[in-house]
Image (tube, grey):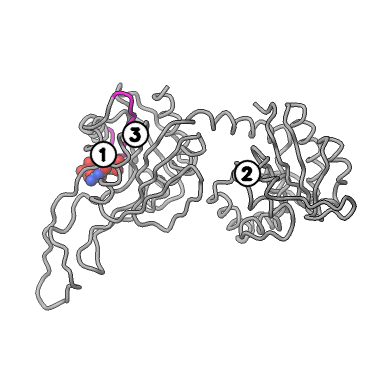
Amino acid sequence: MLTNKNILLGVSGSIASYKSASLIRLLVKAGANVRVVMTKEACNFITPLTLSTLSKNPVLSTYFDPETGTWNNHVELGAWADLMIIAPASANTLAKLANGLCDNLLSAVYLSLKCPVYFAPAMDLDMWKHPATQKNIASLLSFGNILIQPGNGELASGLYGEGRMEEPETIVDILIDGLKKKLSLKGKKALVTAGPTYEAIDPVRFIGNHSSGKMGFAIAEELAALGASVILITGPTTLKTNHSGIKRIDINSAEDMLEAALTYFAESDLSILSAAVADYRPKEVSINKIKKDNSELKIDLVKTPDILATLGKLKSDRQILVGFALETDNEEDNAVKKLKNKNLDFIVLNSLRDKGAGFKNDYNKITIIDRELNKEAFELKPKALVAADICKKALDLLR
Ligand code: CTP
């Protein structure tokens, strides 16, 4: 998988940079072309000579090399790379990358990249746990970068905890898995709906729900990581996604969501509808803000279109259609009814009786039920991992 791949290794200042030497050896052995960009501080931990000898390429650490009189072009390096791995990624470098600083060659190259970027943090446990670092990690993940989680163990400080850079062998396995993964949905088109819908009552009020959109965004990101080009139709949410494989369409109401879904459904190989669509909307939308008086206010509601059922009627045999069911009782029976009525390939059941599952949470607990009524119940896990389970099932069916 790594033969002839152009891999850019970014090394920042951390004692873990001694592991960069082994990482380069493994990458070169696997057939990759490796070029190394180091920060000034990294050069204090391990010499550029060591890394250039192992990578068989000059190591770059400044924009300008006074000895050769050459300008180290960050844009050219960015265009050359098939993937970049920053290992070790220090807290300082993570902060720079998360905030778009480019005061050294490594961060300037990062800003110029179009390829996947992996980062393997290494730092002391308190630095790792600090909300500032965690916020930077969340930003980098939202840009579509891939975190190689640091391990638990003895740290250079003598303390024991999380913050150890992952071992080079494991990093290479993760890169290979990533490349394999990226091929699995290459050339496929996917449609995802996410978040709530807002049904207007008047110019300032609406009927909505507590959906955060987290599950749908995690699914869109997983599908994009698998190589699909994704249309993400989302209701109002504060979430951001910057994955280059995702085209985001923001809508408000169920009607808008249906219109957008119908625009893209015919060409979509796989559609996963996770949005919490309002089932009813006000019959009339007041043009002016409704003023209160002493009487009761009654609002007539009419049904919104069922987007999932509409797509189920249009679906061809080559298309996979997936829906969600959020239930509080008779969960499996209700989910199976929806699966059949809406002509789905499988349904993802959330039970509100499961602690930690459902709206707003970062975790979810699901059961997948398919047309043959095979049932698979999963553990409570982070939504990114739940998304991976859902996409794996879809991938199996597409094959
Ligand atoms: N859905 C949709 N359009 C709607 C309502 C729901 O596309 N107007 C989709 C949701 O995105 C989800 C699935 O249908 O994938 C199930 O939604 P849910 O509200 O649980 O089911 P309903 O069919 O609306 O049934 P009920 O509210 O009675 O449980």
- Amino acid type of the residue that numbered disc 1 sits on in the rendered structure: Leu
Identify residue for label 1.
Answer: 308
**Cα gap from disc 2 to disc 3, whole angstroms:** 29 Å
Relative vertical location of residue 33 with respect to residue 89 in this rendering, above or below: above
Q: Position of residue 341 (x, y in %)?
A: 20, 32
Q: Position of residue 92 (x, y in %)?
A: 71, 58
Where on the image, by quarter, is ligand 1?
Answer: top left
- Amino acid type of the residue that numbered disc 3 sits on in the rendered structure: Glu
Q: How many marks?
A: 3
- Amino acid type of the residue that numbered disc 2 sits on in the rendered structure: Val
Residue 264 picture quarter: top left
Q: From the viewer's perspective, is 163 left or right of 293?
A: right
On whether residue 120 falls in the magenta region, the answer is no
Instruction: Tell me the number on the disc at residue 196.
Output: none
Identify residue for label 2.
Answer: 117
| Numbered range of the magenta stretch | 317-332
Identify residue for label 3.
Answer: 267
